[in-house]
Image (tube, coloured by chain):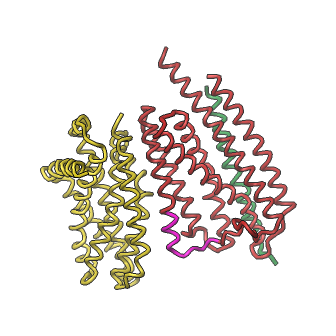
Chain colours: A green, B yellow, C red
């Protein structure tokens, strides 16, 4: 029976795209500033 | 080749004489090292942790911090005296200039280490009989490594606005392999372990020195020339 | 001015495609890949962590290579590329440094270990930050390019020493089960999904670097115009 650790998976699967999308949005705002 | 060596010694001699004249940097580095040792001694619980487990790390953290102080001072002195422009206008091969700076910084840091080590033995009640040649050897080996990288980074840092902050930020990652190696070898020396257990680490230290001294010497002109 | 804008637009297209691909990877992970019996659902963090690691390392190596080439050729495009790759590398390292501990906690019971891969990522992160801090502190473009290049090369050469240092310690990291050329010990669904995820992450790297490069180009052009007037 695999251990009950879905919460960790959820955390990682939220954090990772947030960081990458956050950086992309920052780049977008920086390109707009010109 | 001998010409380069002679020039390097000339550069080193100039720097060392300049420092001996004022002596402030040397004294502040030594006082700093002594203070760090005192703080470490009061920070630990003598019943919980045996000295011999903690000692190598304490020694090397102290050496690392004092070295960083020394490297900062060395180039700040240059900047204050605007001496480096004079050096650069002379047709001095950059490898020799780097070697000279490296030797001067090495002399400085090793002096601080030579005075800190007896203080360390005194404060922490460490027994160095038998292991002290090894300690001196590994100290020299590790110090060459991080002083080489420190010399080129302080040449860069002195040309930026936040020089005192820039040097540690750049240098600390590079100090880690020599520090880890030095702590590992020192702890084995203090415990009287056989040489075979230290060979891997000693090879790491030696390789680091060869690679980084060579590389920093080659890269030095990219930093000091326009 | 327009050259930069075109590059930025191309970059954002790649980024959009990459995020679409990432959505696809999420579907594969949740619907297609099996649940690992010993590690449970947390094992699936692997499909994000490993590609992020690959991208960080790639970003870092490219900074090193571009730095070496810059000192040889003095081509400003190389310096601009290195700066872009370093910034993007910080983003991927941040993903590694967050997903790593989130994965480690349920599997090994501890948030952090000083094993080879986590330690190396931490160092890459610090080296990237140092590189970017130096760039921010030097204003003259050619001096900034030269100094950054030196740090880039020295940093690239530091990595094998960090690796060697950690190797001389015992390591806790799971054995590399993917990089065996003859017979990968991963079940095929896992391997396929991992490879697709690696491709998506690489696409994202390309998109981010292209965009960042284009932005740098635009900013330089604007500065030149301001100086001239």
**Residue furthest top in the image:** C229
Residue C13 to residue B22: above or below = above
**Residue furthest left in the image:** B21
Identity of the residue drawn at 51% across and 33% down: C76
Identity of the residue drawn at 70% across and 59% down: A12
Q: Is residue C172 magenta?
A: yes
Q: Nearer the viewer, residue B6 or C130?
A: B6
Where's residue B179, x and y in %? 39, 66
In the picture, residue C66 is in which quadrant?
top right
In the picture, residue C144 is in which quadrant?
top left
Residue C174 to residue C208: above or below = below
Range drawn in magenta: C162-173
Inspect this view and state whether residue C217 appears: yes
Q: Is residue B54 left or right of residue B133?
A: right
Q: Is residue B105 magenta?
A: no
Q: Nearer the viewer, residue B205 or C108?
A: B205
């Amino acid at each position: 029976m695999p251990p009950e650790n879905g919460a960790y998976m959820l955390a990682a699967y939220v954090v990772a795209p947030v960081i990458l999308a956050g950086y992309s949005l920052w780049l977008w705002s920086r390109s707009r500033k010109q | 080749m001998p010409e380069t060596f002679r020039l390097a010694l000339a550069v080193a001699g100039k720097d060392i004489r300049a420092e001996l004249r004022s002596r402030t940097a040397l004294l502040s580095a030594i006082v700093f090292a002594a203070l760090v040792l005192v703080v470490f001694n009061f920070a630990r619980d003598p019943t919980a942790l045996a000295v011999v487990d903690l000692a190598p790390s304490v020694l090397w953290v102290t050496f690392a911090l004092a070295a960083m102080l020394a490297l900062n001072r060395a180039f700040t002195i240059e900047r204050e005296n605007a001496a480096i422009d004079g050096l650069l206008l002379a047709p001095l091969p950059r490898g020799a200039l780097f070697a000279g700076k490296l030797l001067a910084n090495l002399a400085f840091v090793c002096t601080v280490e030579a005075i800190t080590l007896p203080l360390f033995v005194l404060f922490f009640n460490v027994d160095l009989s038998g292991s002290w040649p090894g300690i001196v050897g590994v100290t020299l080996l590790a110090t060459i490594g991080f002083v080489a990288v420190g010399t080129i980074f302080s040449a860069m840092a002195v040309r930026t606005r936040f020089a005192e902050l820039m040097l540690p930020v750049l240098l600390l990652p590079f100090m880690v392999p020599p520090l880890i190696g030095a702590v590992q070898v020192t702890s084995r020396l203090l415990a009287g372990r056989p040489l075979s257990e230290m060979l891997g680490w000693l090879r790491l230290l030696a390789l680091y020195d060869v690679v980084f001294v060579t590389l920093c010497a080659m890269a030095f002109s990219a930093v000091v020339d326009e | 001015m327009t050259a930069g804008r075109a590059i930025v637009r191309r970059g954002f297209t790649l980024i959009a495609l990459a995020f679409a691909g990432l959505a696809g990877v999420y579907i594969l992970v949740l619907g297609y890949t099996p649940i690992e019996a010993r590690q449970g659902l947390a094992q699936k963090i692997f499909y994000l962590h490993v590609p992020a690691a690959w991208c960080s390392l790639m970003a870092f190596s490219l900074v090193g290579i571009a730095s070496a080439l810059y000192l040889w050729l003095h081509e400003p495009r190389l310096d601009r590329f290195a700066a872009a790759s370093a910034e993007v590398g910080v983003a991927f390292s941040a993903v590694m440094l967050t997903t790593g501990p989130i994965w480690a906690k349920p599997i090994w019971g501890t948030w952090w270990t000083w094993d080879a891969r986590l330690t190396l990522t931490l160092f890459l992160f610090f080296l990237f930050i140092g590189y970017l801090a130096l760039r921010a502190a030097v204003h003259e473009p050619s001096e900034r390019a030269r100094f950054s290049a030196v740090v880039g090369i020295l940093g690239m050469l530091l990595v094998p020493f960090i690796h060697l240092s950690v190797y001389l310690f015992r390591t806790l990291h799971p054995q590399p089960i993917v990089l065996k050329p003859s017979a990968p010990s991963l079940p095929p669904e896992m391997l396929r999904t991992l490879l697709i995820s690696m491709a998506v992450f690489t696409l994202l790297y390309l998109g981010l670097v292209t965009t960042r490069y284009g932005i740098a180009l635009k900013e330089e052009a604007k500065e030149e115009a301001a100086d001239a007037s």
